[in-house]
Amino acid sequence: DKEMSVTELIGKTKLSQANISQHLSVMKSKGIVTSNRKGKNIYYKLTNPKIIKAFDIIREVLAERMRGYGKR
């Protein structure tokens, strides 16, 4: 819902700066996020709030598969 800087995203995800930057670059090229420079910082924001719902569904599916992994 709000813009976040790379530093904020690192804190939330525990991923490295390089990893976050790579993901943001791809997502920006695909129109998933927009960027806005404020001073020395660049802030990123999702272009459509429905993306969060899609990520939540993907996370649920992956969690279900991980719980069921090896039971076949």
Image: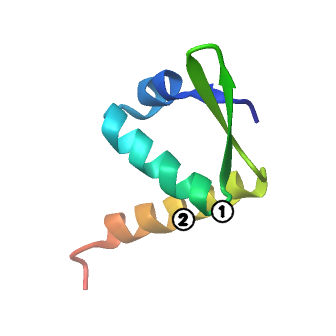
In the image, residue 54 above or below residue 3: below
How many marks overall?
2
* Residue at far left of view: 70
Residue at left offset 41%, top offset 40%? 20
Q: Quadrant of the N terminus?
A: top right
Residue 15 makes an appearance in the image: no
In the image, residue 26 above or below residue 40: below
Asked whether, in this view, residue 36 is left or right of residue 17, the answer is right
The residue type indicated by label 1 comes to Ala
* SS under mark 2: helix
52, 25: nearer the viewer: 25
> Residue 39: horizontal and vertical position, in percent?
63, 13
Residue at left offset 40%, top offset 48%? 22
> Residue 58: horizontal and vertical position, in percent?
54, 65
In the image, residue 61 above or below residue 53: below
Asked whether, in this view, residue 18 is left or right of residue 13, the answer is left
Point out which mark residue 54 bears. Answer: 1
Residue at left offset 32%, top offset 38%? 18
Q: Quadrant of the C terminus?
A: bottom left
- Give the spatial CA distance, label 2 vs label 1: 6 Å
> Residue 45: horizontal and vertical position, in percent?
69, 39
Asked whether, in this view, residue 64 is left or right of residue 58, the answer is left
User: Do residues under tags 2 and 1 come within 8 Å of each other at their CB atoms?
Assistant: yes
Label 2, on which residue?
Answer: 58
The residue type indicated by label 2 comes to Ile
Neighbour class for label 2 at 10 Å: few (<14), some, many (≥20)? few
Residue 66 makes an appearance in the image: yes
> Residue 54: horizontal and vertical position, in percent?
65, 62
Residue at left offset 63%, top offset 29%? 43
Point out which mark residue 24 bears. Answer: none
